Each structure stands twice: as structure tokens, then as C-alpha cells.
Image (tube, rainbow, N blue to C red):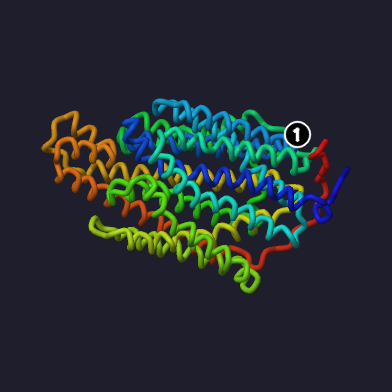
């Protein structure tokens, strides 16, 4: 049975399955951030290892988004979405059983494989189910579901960490994933695009290795030195592999990495805005938990609760954005969101050792407000600028660039913090092993200070971390200003009309 998006009888029920998937991924992202300080203390992980735990997920996720979109187009989006959820479930089980940093990195990599299937397929299903007049509302609900996981993750994560071992943050994923799988199987119709190009193995390999080596080189720079042969080699290899990827795809008749989509101004500049917003937000989410938990002295639950101003700001943005979009179009709304994010990050960059939580709460709420105003219109209008038969490749490219920006943002800003912390920490009076432990992370320094009764070391660690955090926030603020300038100059307003679909096949087989 072939059904057009505007008449599909279960499209709003099917959206519930998509919302369940996005809620799971949104939840998982923030619960890990809150757990990082606890994992650093219990696993003895330094800053570089913590970045690797975060980046192992983001790099795999970004690298698999391109083939995932085409696998869904050719073999059925519901089928591949359920497969992605099952892989994510396996990674969560592995994380629950992990007992060292290497096992956690492996678990997060497996979860990245699952998320690499889930993200682009959920985004590409929406245009196949909803006509243009309903699509903005549907995309808004999907984005809101992802944002809703942000406040749930820290609070539930804090509760779990206060009463159970750190592996419980992975265990909580299992019932959510089970619900999402059942919802997809029972509610989501199967959709496909038989004319989609085949998955190119060489393109996939170049994507994975190029991104992996580039992010690894940035991640290892502060610890090994930016002039070390390994770091320089990894950075050079990453640039060469990504260049080879782009050149290869430009010669393909039907490429997986369809760079011709970037010729559409609406898609290009909305994608740029979404990518730079994720660069900024990823850095903010990485620096905050250690500050709230270690420098300000909150427990895991207290840290989660104190991150609430950001999702509350997103909630306010979700209420106001649709009205503003209908009156002014996407460009002024996205620009306003980026301006608010820039102001918030630059305000946060003035944080001092003696500033209390109230100061942080103000700029954190502004971050959420700006993020909500910028990301939802950017994502919605990027996909809205494409014909529906390019939904799979377009959503794959959009989500790939967005996640690449997040991975690079985490690597760069994490490296800035690590390098600044190490250079500003005073460990001259400590014996070798104690100095090494203190230099690993601010959590390690506080553990050494508590063991030795060295209050001066704790104060030095707090000051050193704040210096790196302020520098990272300043970079985030400047990045948001750069995005603002690009969007204001180049983003079309209003969004162009979408062409009619030509090749989409929708099979009503949810109950087959």
C-alpha cells in the first residue's frame, strides 16, 4: 500500500515512536556529563581519558550517519531504526558491566554505532510522513523530545550516582530503549527510497578514519605536546583522509556525501548555524559538571539539579519560537538565539573562584534560551530546504556535520581546559606521584588535597580549572558570534518552497 504523507492515517502515532527514540538519545547525552566527575574519581581517569570517553561516542556517531541514511533509504527506515536501537541497547549493557576506562570507551563506541543509525533515520522519517504544512510542528516535537532528555538526564543520573555505582547510568537506558523498540515496531510504518544509491564502503572507511584521526590528534595535543610526531601525524592524516573523502565524493554520480546539497543556500546556512550551535553547546556541557561538582562542592544529584536552568531556558524558547517564526521568519530568530548564546558564554567566561551558583544559573538559563531559539529553526529549515526524495541524504549530511562540530568542539575545548589547567596548577611542593595525580584532573587534585590536608593545592586546582573553563567559554562565545555574522549575512529569509516528492515509497506495514 502506497500512502502520501498528508493522508497517512497513523502519522501522529508514528511520531510518538520517533519521539521515544529522540528522548532516549537526549537523556543519554546529559547523564554521562554528570557522571564524568564520578568516573574520574572511581576509575582514575584524567582529562584526556574523559574527553576520549565523550569523543568515542561522538566520532562513531558522526561517521556512521552518512551510511545510515542510505541504509534506511534502501532497506527500510523502520528496520534500520530498530537495528540501531538494538545496538544501542547492547552498548548500554556493555557499559553496565565495564570496570575500567577502556571498557567504557568500548561501550560508548558501540552506543555510537547505534546512535549513528537512530539520529538520521528519525530525522528522515518525518518528511516522509508529514506534508509541508504539518512538518514544522512535527519537527518541533522531535526537537523538543531531544531537549526534554536534558533535564531528565542530570537529575536521574544524580539520583543513581548517589545510591548506586556509576555503571547504573547505562542501566537506566535499557527500559527506555525497550519502549522505543516496541513503539517503532507497532506504530511506525516502513518507508524506503528504492532509487537511493548504495552504501559506498570506501567512503565510509574514509569518513571513520578521517574523523577519528583528526579528533584523536586534537585530543592528545595538550598531553603529548602539539609538536609531538604522533599528534602532528594524526592531524595531518585526518586532513588528508577528509580531503580524499571530499574529492572522491565530488567525482561520484550519486555520492553518499552529497555536497551538491550545500549549493542550496537555505540548507547550507541553516546547517552552518546548527553545527556551530552544537560546537558551542558541547563545550559548555563538558566544562560545567566538573565546575559544579568539584569546585562548588555539590554531589551528583545537586549537580544535575543545578543544570536545570538550561533546559528551563529551552522550554521558554520552545514556547516563543513558533510565534516569532511566523511573524519574522527564521533568520531573525536564529540570529537572536545565537546572540543570546554568545552573550551567555562570554558572561560565563568572567566566572571567578569566589562566584557562587547564582551567577552561573543566570548565564546557564540564557544558554538554554539561545540554544532553543537557534537550533530548532535551523534544523527544521535545513531539511525544509530540500526536496522530500533527498530527505535521507540531506538528514544524514546535516546530522553528520552537526555531530562532527560537536566532536571537534569537545576535543578543542577539552584540550584548552586540560592545557590551561596543567600550566596554571601549582604542584612544585608535591612529591612526584602526588603531583602527577593532581595534574590529571581537578578531581584528582582535590583527592590529593583531601589526603594530604593541603588546602592550598585545592585552591590552586580550582583557580587553574576556572582559568581553563573561562577560556573555553570565551572561545564558545566567539564561535556563536561568528555563526551570528554568517547567518545574518547569508541565510535566506523566508524559507524557500519545497519541490514535490517524486520517488518516495511508503509501505504501511507496521502491523504486517
Q: In which quadrant of the rendered image does the N terminus lie?
A: top right
Query: At x 54% / y 66%, what residue is drawn?
Result: 488
Give the residue drawn at x 72%, y 33%.
198
Outermost residue on the left side: it is 429
Q: Where is residue 480 in the image (x, y as percent from the top left)?
A: 45, 59
Residue 224 rendering spot, x and y as whole percentages = 31, 33
Residue 3 in the figure: left or right of residue 428: right
Helix, strand or loop for disc 1: helix
Q: Would residue 435 be found to the left or right of residue 293 on screen?
A: left
Pointer 1 residue: 75
Q: In this view, does 50 lie above or below 277?
A: above
The one nearer the camera, 477 or 362, is: 362
Task: State which quarter of the image contains the C terminus.
Answer: top right
How many badges with numbers are in the image? 1
Q: In which quarter of the image is residue 75?
A: top right
Task: Write the residue at 28% across / 51% down.
Answer: 296
Q: Nearer the viewer, residue 42 or 499?
A: 42
Residue at the far front in the pictured view: 163
Q: Where residue 179 sits in the image (x, y, percent)?
A: 64, 40
Q: Can residue 411 be seen in this view?
A: yes
The residue closer to the viewer here, 468 or 255, is 468
- Which image quarter: residue 320? bottom right
| Mark 1 closeness class: few <14, some 14–19, many ≥20 residues within 10 Å | some
Seen in the picture, residue 322 relative to 376 is either above or below; the reply is below
Look at the picture and state if 57 lies above or below 23: above
Amino acid at each position: 500500500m502506497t500512502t502520501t504523507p498528508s493522508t497517512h492515517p497513523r502519522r501522529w502515532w508514528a511520531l510518538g515512536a520517533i519521539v521515544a527514540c529522540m528522548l532516549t538519545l537526549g537523556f543519554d547525552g546529559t547523564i554521562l556529563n554528570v557522571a564524568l566527575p564520578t568516573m574520574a574519581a572511581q576509575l582514575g581517569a584524567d582529562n584526556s581519558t574523559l574527553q576520549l570517553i565523550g569523543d568515542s561516542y561522538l566520532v562513531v556517531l558522526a561517521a556512521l550517519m552518512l551510511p545510515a541514511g542510505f541504509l534506511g533509504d534502501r532497506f527500510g527506515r523502520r528496520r534500520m531504526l530498530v537495528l540501531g536501537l538494538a545496538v544501542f541497547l547492547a552498548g548500554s549493557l556493555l557499559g553496565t558491566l565495564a570496570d575500567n576506562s577502556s571498557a567504557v570507551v568500548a561501550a560508548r563506541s558501540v552506543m555510537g554505532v547505534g546512535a549513528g543509525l537512530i539520529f538520521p533515520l528519525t530525522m528522515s522519517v518525518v518528511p516522509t510522513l508529514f506534508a509541508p504544512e504539518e512538518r514544522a510542528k512535527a519537527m518541533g516535537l522531535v526537537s523538543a523530545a531531544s531537549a526534554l532528555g536534558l533535564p531528565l538526564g542530570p537529575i536521574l543520573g544524580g539520583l543513581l550516582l548517589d545510591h548506586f555505582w556509576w555503571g547504573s547510568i547505562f542501566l537506566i537506558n535499557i527500559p527506555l530503549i525497550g519502549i522505543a523498540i516496541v513503539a517503532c515496531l507497532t506504530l511506525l510504518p516502513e518507508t524506503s527510497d528504492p532509487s537511493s544509491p548504495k552504501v559506498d564502503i570506501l567512503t565510509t572507511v574514509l569518513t571513520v578514519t578521517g574523523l577519528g584521526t583528526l579528533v584523536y590528534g586534537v585530543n592528545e595535543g595538550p598531553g603529548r605536546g602539539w609538536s609531538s610526531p604522533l599528534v602532528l601525524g594524526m592531524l595531518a592524516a585526518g586532513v588528508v583522509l577528509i580531503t580524499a573523502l571530499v574529492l572522491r565524493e565530488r567525482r561520484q554520480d550519486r555520492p553518499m556525501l552529497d555536497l551538491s546539497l550545500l549549493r542550496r543556500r537555505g540548507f547550507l546556512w541553516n546547517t552552518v548555524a546548527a553545527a556551530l550551535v552544537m560546537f558551542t553547546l558541547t563545550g559548555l556541557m563538558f566544562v560545567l559538571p566538573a565546575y559544579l561538582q568539584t569546585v562548588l562542592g555539590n554531589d551528583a544529584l545537586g549537580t544535575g539539579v543545578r543544570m536545570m536552568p538550561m533546559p528551563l531556558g529551552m522550554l521558554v524558547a520552545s514556547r516563543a519560537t513558533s510565534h516569532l517564526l511566523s511573524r519574522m521568519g527564521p533568520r531573525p530568530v536564529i540570529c537572536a538565539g545565537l546572540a543570546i548564546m554568545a552573550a551567555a558564554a562570554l558572561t560565563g567566561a568572567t566566572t571567578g573562584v569566589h562566584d557562587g551558583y547564582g551567577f552561573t544559573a543566570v548565564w546557564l538559563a540564557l544558554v538554554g534560551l539561545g540554544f532553543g531559539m537557534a537550533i530548532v529553526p535551523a534544523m527544521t529549515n535545513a531539511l525544509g530546504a530540500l526536496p522530500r526524495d533527498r530527505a535521507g541524504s540531506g538528514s544524514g549530511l546535516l546530522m553528520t556535520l552537526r555531530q562532527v562540530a560537536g566532536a571537534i568542539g569537545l576535543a578543542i575545548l577539552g584540550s584548552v581546559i586540560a592545557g590551561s589547567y596543567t600550566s596554571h596548577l601549582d604542584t612544585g611542593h608535591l612529591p612526584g606521584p602526588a603531583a602527577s595525580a593532581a595534574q590529571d584532573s581537578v578531581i584528582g587534585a582535590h583527592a590529593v588535597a583531601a589526603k594530604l590536608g593541603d588546602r592550598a593545592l585545592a585552591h590552586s586546582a580550582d583557580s587553574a580549572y576556572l582559568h581553563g573553563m573561562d577560556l573555553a567559554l570565551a572561545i564558545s562565545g566567539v564561535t556563536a558570534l561568528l555563526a551570528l555574522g554568517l547567518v545574518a549575512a547569508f541565510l535566506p529569509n523566508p524559507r524557500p518552497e519545497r519541490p514535490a516528492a517524486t520517488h518516495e515509497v511508503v509501505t504501511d506495514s507496521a502491523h504486517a
